[in-house]
Amino acid sequence: MKVIAFLGSPRKDGNTELLLKEAVRGIEASGSAVQVFNLNLMRISPCQDCGGCDEAGKCIVEDEMSLIYNAIRTADRIILASPVFFFGLTAQAKIMIDRCQAFWCEKYLLKKPISEGEFGRKGLLLLVGGMEKEDGIKCSEATAKAFFRTISVPEHKTLSFLGVDSKGAILNHPTAIKDAYAAGKELVRI
């Protein structure tokens, strides 16, 4: 089973990365490997809405997004992990999602959705926010839902934690680390 993960946090060893590491640990304990893309370290240009992908479903911008396109196309399980900034996903996560417009064109204009593959396609969304209100989670989840739907991931689980802001604070949450590990194990269960 091929599992990929997108880390959308710019903060090294921050709360989102700690959660993602636990989910990955759960997946690896179940016998699958995970390819993690640290979006903050990748050279990915924003979508230019140029229409270059309209007819072929392929982006004409050449950068490190090409590595992501190939990984998404062949993945069975996809994780998106992001802190919540101003009620939304980070710029790092959003830039990658916006560049998936090529998959949208392929699926909806060309009627060629990504294959479900041998195991079906499932997703996991990991969100951490400093705010106490659920607005940021709802807005972030709406964007993630559109992303997952576009890349033919019909179902995903969301694990979100609010009121977690300072670096490492997620470690003080009573269940977060355990929950992320369990969500990783559950993600690859057939």
Image: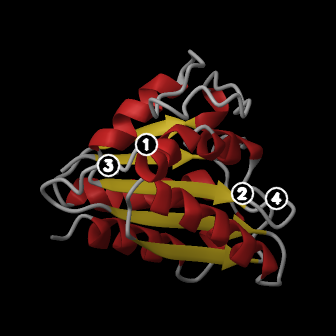
Residue positioned 51% across, 43% down in the render: 105
Residue wearing tag 2: 89
Residue wearing tag 4: 85
Q: Residues within 10 Å of mark 3 (few under 14, many from 20)?
A: some
Q: Give residue 138's position: percent from left, percent from top.
A: 71, 78
Tell me which numbered mark, 3 or 4, is placed earlier along the sequence. Answer: 4
Disc 2 marks a residue whose amino acid type is: Leu
Q: Distance between the residues labelled 4 and 2?
A: 6 Å
Disc 3 marks a residue whose amino acid type is: Ile
Q: Are marks 4 and 2 in contact (CB under 8 Å)?
A: yes
Q: Do the residues labelled 3 and 4 touch (CB within 8 Å)?
A: no
Q: Is residue 45 above or below residue 37?
A: above
Q: Distance between the residues labelled 1 and 2?
A: 24 Å
Q: Is residue 107 left or right of residue 189?
A: right
Residue positioned 80% across, 61% down in the render: 166
Q: In this view, does 177 lie above or below 89?
A: below
Tell me which numbered mark, 2 or 3, is placed earlier along the sequence. Answer: 2
Q: In this view, does 66 lie to the left or right of 44?
A: left
Observer-nearest of 173 and 109: 109
Q: Give residue 161's position: percent from left, percent from top.
A: 65, 76
Q: Determine which of the numbered discs, if any, sits on residue 69 in the image.
A: none
Tell me which numbered mark, 1 or 2, is placed earlier along the sequence. Answer: 2
Residue wearing tag 1: 106
For residue 9, say whether it is visible: no
Closer to the camera: disc 4 or disc 1?
A: 1
